[in-house]
Image: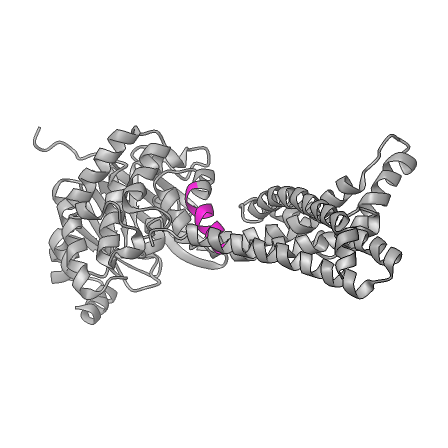
């Protein structure tokens, strides 16, 4: 165990950094996608709701590993060879971030939709009755209340997404699992290596949960 | 000059409203003059709340015409938000913004819609809070208030937009009995200073005392209307008599 840590500790730490980088990119864009698609699924326009539903169901219906292969290999192949436009290259980080953003974004959209729907319709009606436009009512009254109820689910989704970065080892991104595999291949110490890797994920996720609890406490109003 | 014709604040003609197959309002025609207090009574499901909600287009009419202060709000092109700035509404369940304290509840719309600058809105809000007897609650959050206090704040919030018309949708139905009085007092005061009011309520005492006109609705129709004395003293329609016998 100590031999793994002294010899490969730095390598694994760097890999953890790559995992976090990937998760950060993915989550950042997932929040944007989730917000847009989530709001699209509560507006009155049927077309918007339909597009949102198609997106969510499409992404949820495809395993992330398939999505990863599709984006990393399939999309450049389509662009360069089938369409013959050429010149498109995607790094594993880019493809991985897109993949995470789409996957997590779809789930975030559902969380945001459910959060908005959990706010009593009377809140929106009261804001509208004062003359506030729909969008201002959403931003000033409904969303602040929705976000408060959404936080536990969003944190949960963050944790799932952080762990899902391990799936992106299949497209060769040097995140933690991919790196650990190489360590095992070099040392044959699979028990020690995977135990260390597991502990590393655990620590990061516990830290994330602790931060989330602190945030949740701060968002309680008028307590 | 004394017999000057009162201006019409609300004009409703042949209003119809259906939810899918269900016809809630069948053919409603109604005029409310400026400064008039109209009280709508009737059994639940009679369409009285729906009628009220059509008056600021929280429900879009399925047919007919509604003119508020000269603006036809059944016209798709009308700026409904401008009309709503002049038509306050008070809800059965108060609907105070839970994420804001009382003062911010009152200041939100005036400031956001740039009707008043921050300082003016603040002064106005405190003045309105004083009027409903809650000056000491400016910093409280809705969940810290009693039902009666919440409803008085809701009334003050609507008044901060300086509306010409106030709509009340069963404002005391969700209150404990001992809190009904304080809300009715505020409404009475509003009526006395000449606010145009349309009130849907089960408070017959209020209807009798404050209403200039009482309307009895059932089955999506106005079955009878008249002065409180006429409706309560000598109802003509058998359904009105039946209803009043049950509630009085």
**Horizontal side of residue B177 vs B2, given as left or right:** right
Identify the image quadrant of the C terminus of chain A: bottom left
Residue drawn at x 36%, y 43% is: A129
Where is residue B190? Give x, y as percent: 16, 44
Name the one closer to the observer, A198 or B204. A198
Residue A23 can be seen, yes or no: yes
Above or below, A117 against B9 in this view is below
State yes or no: residue B236 in magenta.
no
Residue reaching furthest left? B2
Identify the image quadrant of the N terminus of chain A: bottom right
Q: Which residues are magenta?
A: A140-149
**Horizontal side of residue B27 vs A56, given as left or right:** left
Q: Quadrant of residue B83?
A: top left
Above or below, A180 against A87 in this view is below
Residue drawn at x 30%, y 28% is: B117
Where is residue A220? Give x, y as percent: 40, 53
Name the one closer to the observer, A164 or B125. A164
Its colouring scheme is one colour
Residue drawn at x 25%, y 35% is: B122
Above or below, A164 against B76 in this view is below
**Horizontal side of residue B226 vs A135, given as left or right:** left
Name the one closer to the observer, B74 or A188. A188
User: Magenta part mainly helix, strand or loop?
Assistant: helix
Residue B91 can be seen, yes or no: no
State yes or no: residue A141 in magenta.
yes
Name the one closer to the observer, A85 or B164. A85
Where is residue A103? Give x, y as percent: 70, 51
Where is residue A149? Give x, y as percent: 48, 55
């Amino acid at each position: 165990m100590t031999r793994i840590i002294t010899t490969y500790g730095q390598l694994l730490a760097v890999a953890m950094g790559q995992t976090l980088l990937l998760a950060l990119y993915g989550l950042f864009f997932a929040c944007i996608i989730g917000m847009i698609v989530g709001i699209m699924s509560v507006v009155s326009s049927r077309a918007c709701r339909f597009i949102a539903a198609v997106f969510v169901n499409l992404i949820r219906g495809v395993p992330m590993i398939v999505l990863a292969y599709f984006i990393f290999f399939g999309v450049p192949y389509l662009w360069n060879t089938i369409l013959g436009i050429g010149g498109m290259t995607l790094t594993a980080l880019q493809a991985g971030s897109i993949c995470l953003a789409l996957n997590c974004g779809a789930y975030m959209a559902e969380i945001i939709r459910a959060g908005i729907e959990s706010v009593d319709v009377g809140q929106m009606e009261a804001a509208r009755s004062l003359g506030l436009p729909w969008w201002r009512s959403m931003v000033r009254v409904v969303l602040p209340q929705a976000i408060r109820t959404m936080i536990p689910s969003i944190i949960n989704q963050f944790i799932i997404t952080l762990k899902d970065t391990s799936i992106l080892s299949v497209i060769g991104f040097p995140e933690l699992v991919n790196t650990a595999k190489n360590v095992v291949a070099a040392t044959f110490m699979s028990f020690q290596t995977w135990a260390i890797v597991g502990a590393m994920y655990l620590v990061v996720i516990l830290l994330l949960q602790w931060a989330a609890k602190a945030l949740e406490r701060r968002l309680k109003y008028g307590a | 000059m004394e017999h000057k014709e009162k201006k019409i604040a609300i004009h409703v003609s042949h209003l119809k409203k259906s939810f899918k197959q269900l016809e809630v309002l069948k053919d409603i025609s109604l005029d409310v003059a400026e400064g008039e207090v109209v009280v709508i009574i009737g059994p639940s499901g009679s369409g009285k709340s729906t009628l009220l909600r059509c008056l600021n287009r929280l429900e879009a009419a399925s047919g007919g015409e509604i003119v508020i202060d000269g603006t036809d709000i059944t016209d798709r092109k009308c700026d409904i938000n401008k009309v709503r700035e002049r038509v306050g509404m008070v809800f059965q369940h108060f609907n105070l913004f839970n994420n804001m304290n009382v003062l911010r509840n009152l200041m939100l719309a005036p400031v956001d819609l740039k009707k008043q600058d921050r300082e003016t809105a603040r002064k106005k809000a405190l003045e309105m809070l004083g009027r409903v007897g809650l000056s000491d609650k400016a910093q409280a959050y809705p969940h810290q208030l009693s039902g009666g206090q919440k409803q008085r704040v809701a009334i003050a919030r609507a008044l901060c937009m300086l509306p010409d018309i106030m709509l009340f949708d069963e404002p005391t139905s969700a209150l404990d009995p001992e809190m009904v009085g304080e809300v009715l007092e505020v409404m009475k005061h509003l009526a006395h200073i000449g606010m145009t009011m349309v009130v849907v309520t089960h408070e017959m005492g209020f209807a009798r005392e404050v209403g200039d006109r009482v309307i009895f609705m059932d089955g999506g129709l106005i079955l009878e209307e008249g002065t409180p004395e006429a409706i309560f003293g000598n109802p003509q329609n058998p359904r009105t008599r039946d209803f009043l016998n049950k509630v009085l």
